[in-house]
Image: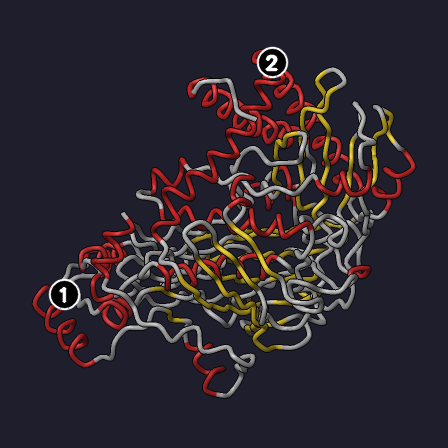
Amino acid sequence: MTSPLGPIELEVITGTIRSAEVEIEAAVERAARSPMIRDQHDYRVGLYDARGRKLTGRSYGSLVEPIFEFFGDDINPGDVFFWNDPYNSAGSCGHIPDLCTTVPIFYGERLLGFAQVFGHHDDVGGCVPGSLPVQVRDQWGEGLVVPPIRLYHKGVLDEQAFRIIERNSRLPEHLRGDLDSEIGACRLGSRRLIELADRYGVEALEGAFDAIIENCAATIRSELLPKIEDGVYTFEDYIECDGFTRKLYALRLTMTKTPEKIILDFTGTDPEAEGPINWAIDYCEGRFVRKWMGPVLRCLADSPERAAEIDINEGVLDVIDVVFPEKGTLVTPHFGRPTGLRFFILIRSLGVFAGALAKATGGRMPADHETIRIWGLHSREADGRLSLFREVLGGGGPGRPWADGSDVVHIVPNSRNLPAEFSEQRYPVMVERLALRTDSAGAGRRRGGFGYDKRVRVLRDSMLLSNADRSELSPYGVNGGLAGRPYGVSIEDADGNVRSLPGMVDDVPVRAGDVVRLWTSGGGGWGDPLEREPELVAYDVRCGLVTRQAAEADYGVILTPDAGDADATVDVEATERLRERRRRDRESLPMFDRGEYYRKVRSDGGLVWPEGWSDPDDWSAAPAEAASTAAT
């Protein structure tokens, strides 16, 4: 359908839809009960047309297709659909704590679209509080599984279904409050789309939907694809443990670029895991993962400002195709395999796409990051109720050709950490330190962002949970940049004894008075560290972010010895001599640096590639000037 509207009206409609999504988010936050939804913002919203096409690229959303699959045309005003089943959600609900609520939007008797909220909820049952067990072998140990159901039918609540869902949570008041807030927010979003139909007419509005989606595909083809050299490129990245076995689990990607398309082929990915690191995305033509990975292409825009303007909506499906391996891999698991920690491989999918694009663009892509992990403490109140203190902690963002990485960012847009005041008022903890982690950022011409350094004193006997990858394997650096430092967690008791823990643990006892210390990963660096402006290195030293030792070892910058760190200045002549000597003595720089742990695993024979698969890291860095100039 061709829109009869002009460019100004189309821009107004586009902006109104985006504003409506922001309004939906505000409504969720005002009424939600759980800290995970209300305070940490671990949820997404979306507005879709009547065909289930997402109209904006503000954030990744779930899909509407499960409604068409399970209910066909039996969709009515007043209905509310609900599900969280990873294997019956068209690949869009990756793990059981993500509950999806969808409200159809009618203009009179005509289906106009859908409003949707899906988010990570505090607890939906399972064998561990928080519903993200590490040592679990099937999805039934992770919590209550709900296939697509009609929670409201023509405006009437199914109380029995609601009671079943609520009864299976250890925090039922949180769950009920969250679901009520999400349903109300969807109804608010519905009214905003109806108001647009009142203003422009249904036919014109639906034509605008078509134009919005077509514009996305056209923009990608005209502005972004030409910057990627045609050809076939491979890359892989790893998860370091599945909860039972510590080894590298590989996600492998072959990217084929043509003038009109990008084909992403996951053939060669390792077999499905025993533990909860699987990700069931081989449904509905891979629509969810194609939309999830598509925004990576925005890194090739002419400027960061232009990248922010490019909306990756449903139109990206016209540009990106996907090929899945046979059933039984990490991304094509058999029904029932656990998926709770699928956010590890979800982020790896962005990393393998970015790595392949780095090869195809002369290093003009950001480095790697690990910007999500979840930790927490649970105990019992005096009346027996569960106390669940849990945080989603970000990490350092990647160094980019045009800028350093952002510090302590979260992969979920607009997410936040829990304020110390809130945490201490509500839970038996005292936050003794919250800072940027010194020397955590990967060195580079444009360094990575810094991770957290957090210390929490426990005031009541509790159990500790940690759901984290990249605790040994580092976020990789690109185009000569160095890897960032990995995640760490430890417990210090009253006698000063320190016990380090793996990144993935369930129910580790912590005594009252013990201190939990957490370090989150730094982002990988971009470009040759010896090309970084010495004054920027000195500034990081003055801020306490980089030590003098790292300034010299990683950047080749020598600071004058007659001043403290707070007044550090560059010894220009000594720095120039050291850098020149290092450039002369070193070998050519690699495109990728994965850090010491990867090199050890590789030297010990811990990497085995499939037949016909060559080393994806065998690629040299491009000249920094050419890469950074092309990127900006």
Local crowd at mark 1 within 10 Å, few (<14), some, or many (≥20)?
some
Q: Image quarter for residue 198?
A: top right
- The image shows residue 151 at horizontal and vertical percentages of 83, 34
Q: Which residue is mark 1?
A: 560
Q: Is residue 625 left or right of residue 185?
A: left
Residue that mark 2 sits on: 201
Vertical placement of residue 274 versus 115, above or below: below
Task: Return the mark for residue 406.
Answer: none
Relative height, residue 433 to residue 204 (above, below): below
From this viewpoint, is residue 258 visible?
A: yes
Q: Is residue 85 left or right of residue 272?
A: right
Badge 2: how crowded within 10 Å, few (<14), some, or many (20+)? few
Q: Residue 95: percent from the left, percent from the top? A: 70, 54
The residue mark sitting in front, 2 or 1, is: 2
Residue 297 place in picture, x, y as percent: 43, 49
Label 1 sits on a secondary structure element that is loop
Q: Kindly identify the amino acid type of the residue bearing the numbered disc 1.
A: Thr
